[in-house]
Amino acid sequence: MDERAAGFLALGLSKGAEGAPVAVVTTSGTAVANLHPAVLEASHTGLPLILLTADRPHELRGTGASQTTDQVGIFGSAVRFAVDVPAPSQGTAGEPGAEPGVASAEELRDLRSVTGRAVSAALGFRSGHPGPVHLNLAFRDPLTPSAPLPGLPADTAQQGHAKPDPPLVVPAMLQHVASPALPGNPAHTVVVAGDGAGTDARQLAEVQGWPLFAEPSSGATGGPNSIAAYRALLGSEDLAGSIEQVVVLGRPTLSRPVQRLLGRPDVTVSVVAPGAGPWPDAARNAAVVLPGVSPAWFETSTPPPSAFLERWRAAGAQASRVLDDVTCDEAVLGGPTALSVARAVAAVLGPDDLLVVGSSNPVRDLELVLGLDGPGPAVLANRGLAGIDGTVSTAVGVALAAARRGLRTRALLGDLTFLHDVGGLLRGPDETPVDLEIVVVNDDGGSIFATLEHGALAATSNAANATFERVFGTPHGSNLAQLCAGYGVDHQLVKDVPTLRHALQAPSHGIQVIEVRVPRADRQAESTDLARRIVDAVQE
């Protein structure tokens, strides 16, 4: 129903289809600008969106013509390829089908060529750096051809199912130039798997006998070397100080403790970053940037667990026990917490499920509890820019793509993330039906700021707290049930964790919203206490 939602739905389709290209078509003017948030996310995530934006012909640009603005280069450096395709001419005199607004055979050939280049750039065939591309397409009146397009069968052209034949572009083979040996002391190495790291990160950790710090959307979670609550464990100076080397795959974005680890001058950091895109090194401390994981790293036999690995495994087990204590049903008899909700969602979903998780606290809560009750679902998130934009629409796109693979999709979102894209619930009667359960953790505001410096400052005085609430807490008081009713979407308010689990296990049809209300006032104190308890458990 609106272009911003369409952009994020397309992004979700590409995520759910494992990076397949998806086209987005808009009219001109503000419609194009509404795609920008999704384009930025796709650019940073490396997803091949193909943006087809209508425009007015050159003679009408700058004349005040309706819905006309400068769309050329509107997405700047966020796209891998951009071209302004001129409006079709009136064809060659005497050529069959020559009429105003209809492309000639020569123009169609040019269009096929530029489309081939655009698709190749979107898929990163030559660069190894996929991402969005922009074709700005000008049109003259009349906007609907009255004759078949030249060179196409009449029935195909009229139905709009033309399939041009772009030139075949063969991707270059990735050359593994990485050295078989890493610098530093491999015995004291950990693998950090950020967003999009893939299964190589987990395999590398297990083959080499290294601890694995995997973010939920890394695609590398689970396994014997995955360390629970690693970001809290890095608060132990003794444990964190034992790390001498880090291998980074994907884009780590969730944890300040991890970024501090990557910035330590006494830690050797090796970043694996294929393709031509920028490599993740926010701390500017990487010793080496590798284009891929060397096959030689996988050719060794798995070593027996080292004392270093066993120490981290034991610490992870201790952290898991603390997390179990604070999130079990007995601990939340007074009402659910955000962390217990995340655990319930992760516990119910299995390897054949997909979970789209929102930014801010939900993804961080999930990071702490994922794996406590089994392998859990595959997790997808918009971590390119880590914004809350378009997350409902992204989840709808994921659900549409996942249904084709026989997978079921849920989403775990905060209330502000849900409200930011509540328009994504709106689907016309002619759209493909979609099954999607959205769990909204509603604490009436933005509790992530309570866990940062802002939260500590708010506790210093009543005036500071009032400012915090208005600027950072941003309470809204929205009635989600009434919002959902307005969109024709089922809504259920659950008041305890067992009811939430039951709701998630029940069959579902269409889009359903499950709201869980949790307190926000104590979030800062709870986070601090949890981190302290985990560190104390390790040091006992």
Image (tube, rainbow, N blue to C red):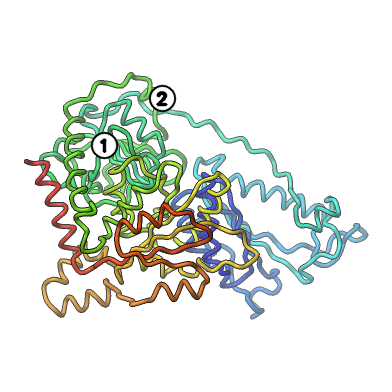
Q: Are marks 2 and 1 in contact (CB under 8 Å)?
A: no
Relative to the observer, which residue lies in front, 9 or 90?
A: 9
The x and y percentages for residue 56 are 68, 70
Q: Is residue 375 above or below residue 157?
A: above
Horizontally, residue 462 falls left or right of residue 375, namely: left
Relative to the observer, which residue lies in front, 37 or 367?
A: 367
SS state under label 2: helix
Regarding residue 287, the answer to whether it shows in the image is no
CA–CA distance in space, label 2 to label 1: 18 Å
SS state under label 1: strand
Q: Is tag 2's residue or tag 1's residue first in the polypeptide sequence?
A: 1
Horizontally, residue 263 falls left or right of residue 535, namely: right
Name the image quarter holding residue 187: top left
Horizontally, residue 476 falls left or right of residue 22, namely: left
Regarding residue 324, the answer to whether it shows in the image is yes
The x and y percentages for residue 327 are 23, 53
Residue located at (31% from left, 56% from top): 498
Binning the other alpha carbons within 10 Å of mark 1 as few (below 14), some (14 to 19) or many (20 upward) gives: many
Residue located at (19% from left, 41% from top): 265
Q: Mark 1 belongs to which amino acid?
A: Val
The x and y percentages for residue 462 are 14, 79
What residue is shown with label 2? 295
Quadrant containing the N terminus in the rendered view: bottom right
Binning the other alpha carbons within 10 Å of mark 2 as few (below 14), some (14 to 19) or many (20 upward) gives: few
Quadrant containing the C terminus in the rendered view: top left
> Which numbered marker is on residue 246?
1
Name the image quarter holding residue 7: bottom right
Q: Mark 2 belongs to which amino acid?
A: Pro
Relative to the observer, which residue lies in front, 506 or 96?
A: 506
The x and y percentages for residue 397 are 53, 56
